[in-house]
Image: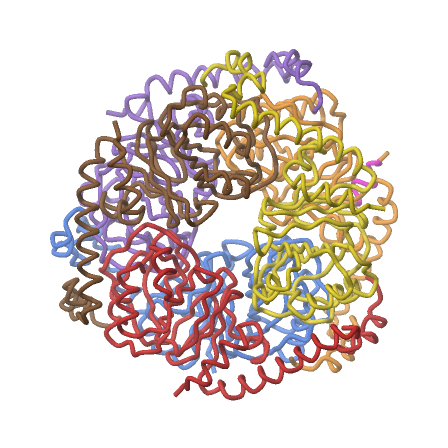
Chain colours: A yellow, B red, C brown, D blue, E orange, F purple
Amino acid sequence: MTTQAQLGALRRLGAATVHEAQGGTGAMDSAIKPLDPTMVLAGPALTVDTRPSDNLAIHRAMTVARPGDVLVVDAKGFTEAGPWGDVLTVYAQQVGLAGLVIDGSVRDSRAIVELGFPVFSRGVCIKGTAKNQPGAVGRPITCAGVAVHPGDVVLGDADGVVVVPAAELDRVLAAAEERERKEERFRAALRDGESLLDLLNLRDRLTDKGNE
Amino acid sequence: MTTQAQLGALRRLGAATVHEAQGGTGAMDSAIKPLDPTMVLAGPALTVDTRPSDNLAIHRAMTVARPGDVLVVDAKGFTEAGPWGDVLTVYAQQVGLAGLVIDGSVRDSRAIVELGFPVFSRGVCIKGTAKNQPGAVGRPITCAGVAVHPGDVVLGDADGVVVVPAAELDRVLAAAEERERKEERFRAALRDGESLLDLLNLRDRLTDKGNE
Amino acid sequence: MTTQAQLGALRRLGAATVHEAQGGTGAMDSAIKPLDPTMVLAGPALTVDTRPSDNLAIHRAMTVARPGDVLVVDAKGFTEAGPWGDVLTVYAQQVGLAGLVIDGSVRDSRAIVELGFPVFSRGVCIKGTAKNQPGAVGRPITCAGVAVHPGDVVLGDADGVVVVPAAELDRVLAAAEERERKEERFRAALRDGESLLDLLNLRDRLTDKGNE
Amino acid sequence: MTTQAQLGALRRLGAATVHEAQGGTGAMDSAIKPLDPTMVLAGPALTVDTRPSDNLAIHRAMTVARPGDVLVVDAKGFTEAGPWGDVLTVYAQQVGLAGLVIDGSVRDSRAIVELGFPVFSRGVCIKGTAKNQPGAVGRPITCAGVAVHPGDVVLGDADGVVVVPAAELDRVLAAAEERERKEERFRAALRDGESLLDLLNLRDRLTDKGNE
Amino acid sequence: MTTQAQLGALRRLGAATVHEAQGGTGAMDSAIKPLDPTMVLAGPALTVDTRPSDNLAIHRAMTVARPGDVLVVDAKGFTEAGPWGDVLTVYAQQVGLAGLVIDGSVRDSRAIVELGFPVFSRGVCIKGTAKNQPGAVGRPITCAGVAVHPGDVVLGDADGVVVVPAAELDRVLAAAEERERKEERFRAALRDGESLLDLLNLRDRLTDKGNE
Amino acid sequence: MTTQAQLGALRRLGAATVHEAQGGTGAMDSAIKPLDPTMVLAGPALTVDTRPSDNLAIHRAMTVARPGDVLVVDAKGFTEAGPWGDVLTVYAQQVGLAGLVIDGSVRDSRAIVELGFPVFSRGVCIKGTAKNQPGAVGRPITCAGVAVHPGDVVLGDADGVVVVPAAELDRVLAAAEERERKEERFRAALRDGESLLDLLNLRDRLTDKGNE
């Protein structure tokens, strides 16, 4: 089980640092962005595999969603349909979902922002969807270039989205805290006038390589 | 003639709802977006067909534009030129245009936002245009994937742009109001704890389809 | 040497006007945009040629950067890596750089905006980079479709980025001021009810061309 | 009714010439290309509107298709699914269809080429489709940027696809023949050493415009 | 161990059929295509994770490659560099590799086609690469949207590329043979004049759905 | 002056090798490809700067073209118009042009291939152009990401296009011949069973870097 402390730490550390901390894996395609740059999202993934231009599988997912879940929807990268809008957002907030990540578009973007529900998508589109395709819920998917298993922890902020396998979370968090402390030391040292080259031990490497 | 009441209703209902209400037709490509997410635009289309990287046809259109018109410009999806800038914006406001939709780019984006003139475009680009291509004004065009006839009613907001044939406007508005009332009932019911599945009568469909 | 007065004039005139004033040359691809639309950047280019997904050459550039320089980085248009983040931003501010233009992505976008450092990029991405590729600093490059020589003057604002050869700066500034004065006259005349067609002497041309 | 003579003339004249002859309208997006550059297709359109990743509407269309029809399918530009393959091709040949134009992908591309059935698509993809979306057959659609009405005449060759309204066909064919004769005269004159500038009467225009 | 009989069956069945037979999973992005449409490739994956514009990891992979392996290289979708050319092709043929799949570009395309070595790539590019990035060999990767584990079986033909987990191969092959037999029966029945609607039992579904 | 021997050497060495030999510079965007993979083109550039969807500048260029010239046209990357077709091809052959490189589309692709005239473009499109924009001939341009000066030597083959400054040609040719000899030695050695790692002296580097 992911704890609130873990999720709080993830939100504080940010997607870029967590991605580095787990060895540069788990980052979704950079086209997946929040509707508003202040949005931050963290929670375990409830995976949805849907054909583009249909949202029946999303409705199915709502029947098994638990408070705190992040809906992660592979809508196949199709941006010319919005399988999610304000009604689903209101429902998701009643259910207690932590947010939505979708490789596709959404609509009612301003209403969603006003409702304060974190949504990360590839686009915004007014075109609606049907409710005819079975789809699948709670199965491993690939979403925006990343393999996502149900229960993987998802973190999104203005920079993008990263996925951390649940079993790796403690290790990754520790590494991310360490990295954050190091970067904070760097920023402080830089403000004190130190050189980034020295902090990163890059002088030898620059000498070796020369100017190409 | 489109009335102010009709245009007010369109602006209030929003592009996504109006698009649904006319049966899922008339939506432009989702890449056409407002310069600022607060922009809303509604009015009858004055159509312009222009070759990319030239704006003589836009100037021709200004000679026949009437207050309240929305200029709808097919610039062929070319984003590396901005046939519209702050001077045309000032002129358009003098003429009383309701706004601009262009399948191309514009420039002077911040000035346009400050002037409060609604502009929906595929991009923003500093590259200017020439004034050499005849083009055509007031003829049927296809703009961002939608057939637009002069006088069709155009509605744009943060989610995108939809086009409604003038003869369909009353019917579409009635359907949109109905849809909006239904969605408002849904949102209220959801806040009272009802299930979206019941509201949408999706339980049988989910059972029939099963998890794929 | 570029003077503060020249740079101030550039910032005031804006990228679109300066681009026109130098004959429609020097504009980068319109996909290069500021992290925040209020960002404005002007200064002489310190050029960096780097392979994608590596930032060693950027670190090399920092060793020769002078206050007021704009780092112009050809990262080959690759958006799935962010060779620049908050630590480099803090360092750049210590060094006194005027800003960054990169044909690639950056990360820590919100921190960069809060630090007030102007960054113009093709994207934002959490994926980090290595420090293994030599790259080249201070050599002529092509960045986002424009040939850039070290010392060329770079100007960026909400509309995009334009590059002016240092030797052309005085001539271009004069032409841009002239153009700005003309446009201001146009805007004033339009507000007084004059026709843009008359101001631009387009009536004959429209008659000659006819409606296509 | 379109006659065999008309269709033969279209095939001989080619898509580029016919497009010019009808005033530069009716050309689909240039990404719609034949599976093999030797493919040529001409016939009246049987229109299909389908959601991406589903081909039930295509099956419905087969129930009303008549020999000589060209299936024109708006699959919404989605290339990551192939709603058409070898089985449908064999069936289409039994029915006597003249070919397929689809704003989407197909699969079994080599088998289709070997069967000699003209297919114009945006891509080739192994991903299959479901059979759950109603779709619509025989209604006006917009396909790859062109408004297509049932019965419009479709012409495709290595260069691309053009759509001619049935009522315009005679006029367009006459203009295309005239254009083809003129171009043939030009080619012959060029081979005799004449200048293209004289043939096109461009000398004055070049003088007027000067080198920019 | 994958047998020659299994690989022969895969090649005969084709990527589209195998993809369907394993439930519509494992298909790479449709932009990954063979250099020549006659190329067919089947074999176990030797996975390579490399930063774009560098091929040191590919050289490392050659040190552990076994005859029959298919090199599967995630070059991050970057098409403006070709980490593979004719020298590596000659070497690969000496080693006995079955082919290459790369989410990136290659060069020396005509020489590769003449050498008869199957290569599936996202593009062709003359720009060379460096040999400085460590990369990783024999680890799980995501390549062109598909999770690939070392030893997964890769099948590519003119339609695209599909990946089958080794443990699933027998089951998938059986399902693919069954599917192929069914499609062959369909094609034969269609040639005998039967209706595809009857063969697929779609009549009720079409009646239920109606024309949208 | 470029000699026939030099051009013959370029054609034999190929674009990828020449690009490497001049230090990895001068390669156009990889989307610029020949209409037919057997096409090879070499000659001095006659540069053309044209707005998209217009070909008057191309006609102007024909008035100054000399036998052996390669027309290099910056049509701004716009693919939805074809400013070049079969008539211009016949004329170009009368004039003796060596070929065309265009950052844009062409039409009459099959006729051009049959005429045997080398054309490298970003696309093929039936949409015609106007003859109204002045454009510029014989001035420095940036075409598909590369700065091109009049007289620079252009080489294109199935892999892409590279541009060599005339003053660099001898040096680049010598380096390319050297590189080709080395690669031929490599290919021979590989066929004799040697390891590519030894030939490239990569063993130490692989050991140093380890598997990431």
Residue at 62% x, 63% y: name it: A112
- E7 part of magenta stretch: yes
Q: Report the side of F140 relative to B28 (left or right).
A: left
**Front position in the image: A120 or B142:** A120
**Front position in the image: B80 or C130:** C130
- In the displayed structure, would residue E38 be above or below residue E96? below
- The mark total stands at 0
- In the displayed structure, would residue A91 be above or below residue A201? below
**Measured from the top left, where is residue F59 in percent x and y?**
22, 50
**Front position in the image: F165 or A158:** A158
Can residue C8 be seen from the camera position used here? yes
Can residue F116 be seen from the camera position used here? no
**Measured from the top left, where is residue F109 in percent x and y?**
41, 52
Residue at 62% x, 55% y: name it: A121
Q: Report the side of A149 relative to D190 (left or right).
A: right
- Magenta residue span: E2-9
**Measured from the top left, where is residue B177 in percent x and y?**
58, 84
Q: Quadrant of residue A127?
A: bottom right
**Measured from the top left, where is residue D180 in percent x and y?**
31, 64
Classify the position of the C terminus of chain A by image quarter: top left
- A22 part of magenta stretch: no
Q: Report the side of F2 relative to F23 (left or right).
A: left
Q: Main secondary structure of the magenta part?
A: helix
- In the displayed structure, would residue E83 be above or below residue A26? above
